[in-house]
Amino acid sequence: MKKWTRRAFIGAGVLASGAVVIGIAIRPGNRSSKVAGLIADKGETVMNIWLKISPDNTVTAIIPHAEMGQGVHTTLAMMLADEMDADWSKVKFQEAPVDKEYANYILAKGFIAGDASFPKFLEGTIDGVFLTAVKSMNFQITGGSASVRFTGQQGMRIAGAAAKSMLLQAAADSWQVPVDELKAQNSTISHPASNRSATYAELAPAAAQVKAPTRPKLKTQEEFTIMGTSKPRFDIPAKVTGEAQFGMDVQVPGMKYATIKASPVFGSKVKSVDTMISSSQQGVNKILNLGNAVAVIADGYWQAKTTLDGLPIEFESSENNGLSQADIINGYKKDMDTALEEDDLELHFKKGDAAAELEGAETLVEAEYELPFLAHATMEPMNCTAWVHDGKCEIWCGSQNPLGVKAAAAKLLDIDFDQVTVHNQLLGGGFGRRSETDVIEQAVLIAKEVDFPVKLIWSREEDTQHDVYREATLSRMKAGLDKSGNPVAYTHQFIFKHHPPEAADVPYDIPNQLIQYSNPTTYVPWGNWRSVDHSTHGFLTESFIDELAFAAKQDPFIYRKNLSKNNPRFQAVLDLVKEKSGWGTALPANWGRGIAIAQSFGTIVAEVAEVEISVEGKVKVHRVVCAVDAGFAIHPDGFIAQMESGIIYGLAAAMTGEITIENGAVAQSNFNNYPVTRMDEAPKIETHIINSGNPPGGGGEPSTPVIAPAVTNAIFNATGIRIRQLPISKNDLREAIRKTT
Amino acid sequence: MITLAINGKEFEVDAPAGMPLLWAIREQCGLTGTKFGCGIAQCGACTVHLDGQAIRSCITPATSAEGKQITTIEGIAPDKDTLHIVQQAWIEEQTPQCGYCQSGQIMSALALLNTNPAPSEEEIDAAMSGNICRCGMYGRIKSAIKRASESLQSSTTPEII
């Protein structure tokens, strides 16, 4: 086996299909020859797995990520095109086929190793083994705010730069001139001294014979011509005409429609259901008992839905049937008490002797917080179209995890992985929900029973009640302050640790810390919810630091800044948000201003919220100022849109987001009782970007964890009421307002 | 069978009693730009025009649309190669993220501009708060409406569908 190096380009050859393969970035063994059949037509040149050149000089970036509005198809193509000096007007994209060859090794490595490179001595071995591991874990995921910082930075840019280098060499060889006399621009290579030029398409076949560079040179920030500009997004035009095709919109000839009802109490089985179709059930094709759910297949969704609604279905009862939200929270409390008593908490982080220092501190601050379960409530309800025929399975869906979809279907049907074809569609919102395969598995089980394609559509009620939820949690925090108000000790116990592993870290200088957690068993299914553990810890940490600032009688901005002396990036973001928000300037009566900051997914975001509390105790968030350092914003407008989106998503959760359990089942069902932020409730958002040149951070999630504490800190500023229980709507603010007016 | 007039074209539709217009449009007429979001008129993703009025097609029986002019997102552009001013404004503001709600947003915005070509901030809020955007692009939707409003007022083609 050839030794693998991260930037190695190895191999060249011509495929039987007629597609020319030049080289291959990222790993040894000629993967291009394997992917060419998947991505290229005759006459096209596959430069490496991430890009091909067509005879009309179009450069196509192959993007191994799903589009859910984050603009990833455009942004990653920009990274590739810029390094390649491609003519942007002739750059296209193609979403990578759902194939193991596109198992995203770079992404997996990014998740595991962070931004750091592997130690040199490990590169040759780990990476080769690692790719095999990544393939076996079917890793083609869109999530973790990772597309730009991992795939873009370490895949697209290198692929583009290497391709350019090879094209330059091909031109130099052909014209017998030194490479450094050549210029690459707009998908053309020219030799000004002899007034010769050739397009990339013309040079591509010759470049196939060139030995690939092992370490292509990347541009500096100053050399960028495409990165750092806001190119119109590829996905937008079709989204204003109705032509954009989401999973929900797939139409397969001969297709019928299904809908489903799973046991309201998670995990319970169907006890009885009559699967006979009566003559009054027009257009109904089949009623299926799937064990833990009942599905109806009909000519249309409406017939399926009304039939399902009219079916008497009995589900088995379990010990969970009597559970209420209070039971669950009390269970967590008991679990934490027991774990504390028995010294049985898991350790997250320890520094110094926090317990001892707490006792000797001048001031002790204590707080207990409680957060609710949250549903994703993607705009597009869960759905999947499946067709099982001739030992094969075809799937149409919008997934953040298409290789996972493929693997799940293959396993269920006990067929070979390659007998499953997945056609990934646009996603009508993901937020982590569409990294799951539960709905796909249901669709496959349903389609298995018939010989035609079936589109399974979940009602909004099913979507709300059978989500995978952000955990409800509780948290106990203590801090000891010295005479000048600085924290000398900090303890924190919380419930549930998922990932990212650093989410519960405190970003401030506190010499003695003890952070612990407990993972009690729960039957409520958990799932990745935009920003994952940061969504809870952003609120917990930034609320508590605000409490400390108040106890220390210090300005919340100054307090945070003084405690971040070792983190100049943090301080710069704080300074910017202070300046842009007008921190410290006067506000009308019953208005308040709150600040919060967090680093997540490699990006630092600070937000200042301005709120008004009405005499009825209603909270209106008027304005949010956001300052952000993600290293460098590749697509500034798209990045700003991501900040806006993350803020509104987090705001909806903070204001009214709450899933509760009653009689073992989710009590909420639709937008009427799981309300989300609407236009008249949405604040004006102003985003300010710092291009610090640090390693790139993510964009999709980092603004979400910050908004809840920015708003609750603003409520405290306006009313003196500290919100320790989310959502905000659970708290009665009327008394405080009566006192001030 | 009933006959529905959608975007100036007639469709024969087999609509059982009570079946919402949404499913006729999507499944039987194949016009999938109109979206299913909630089924109870809470989110606005299914918004279409019935004789120029914005309605929620997920709770409007298909039979009640008989004999009326139904307009969906696919029918608002003046022709195949030209976008409606509102659609154009949506692109210029780079409004959509996931895009799933945007057909409904545009249809609501269009209904607003048809009756009130220069809406105030509050009027926009009032008209648009029935349309949920989970990607939270409310600021951009508002900017796009204002841009479309300005374009419409300076436009020489007064016709709005």
Image (tube, coloured by chain):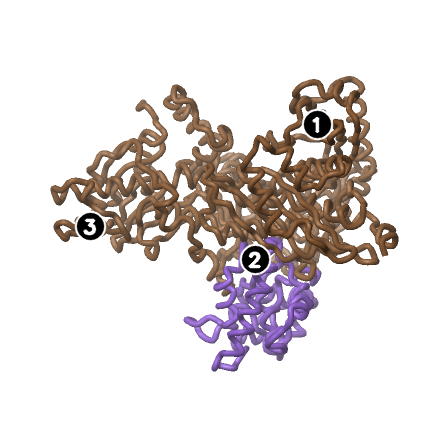
Chain letter behind tag 1 = A
Q: Chain of mark 2?
A: B
Q: Colour of chain B?
A: purple
Q: CA distance from mark 1 to mark 3?
A: 62 Å
Secondary element under disc 2, as helix, strand or loop, is loop
Please report contact status of discs 2 and 1: CB closer than 8 Å, yes or no: no
- Residue visible at 20% across and 50% down in the picture: A190
Crowd rating for badge 2 (residues with CA inside 10 Å; few <14, some 14–19, many 20+): many
Q: Colour of chain A?
A: brown
Kindly identify which residue carries mark 2.
B100
**What amino acid is at disc 3?**
Ser
- The reply to whether residue A275 is in sight is no
Q: Is residue A251 visible?
A: yes
Label 2–label 3 contact, CB within 8 A: no
* Residue at mark 1: A519
Q: How far is mark 2 from mark 1, CA to CA?
A: 36 Å
Amino acid type, label 1: Asn
- Mark 1 residue element: loop
Q: Which residue, given by chain and number where applicable, does mark 3 sit on?
A: A190
Q: Residue at x 44, y 54 (%)?
A: A230
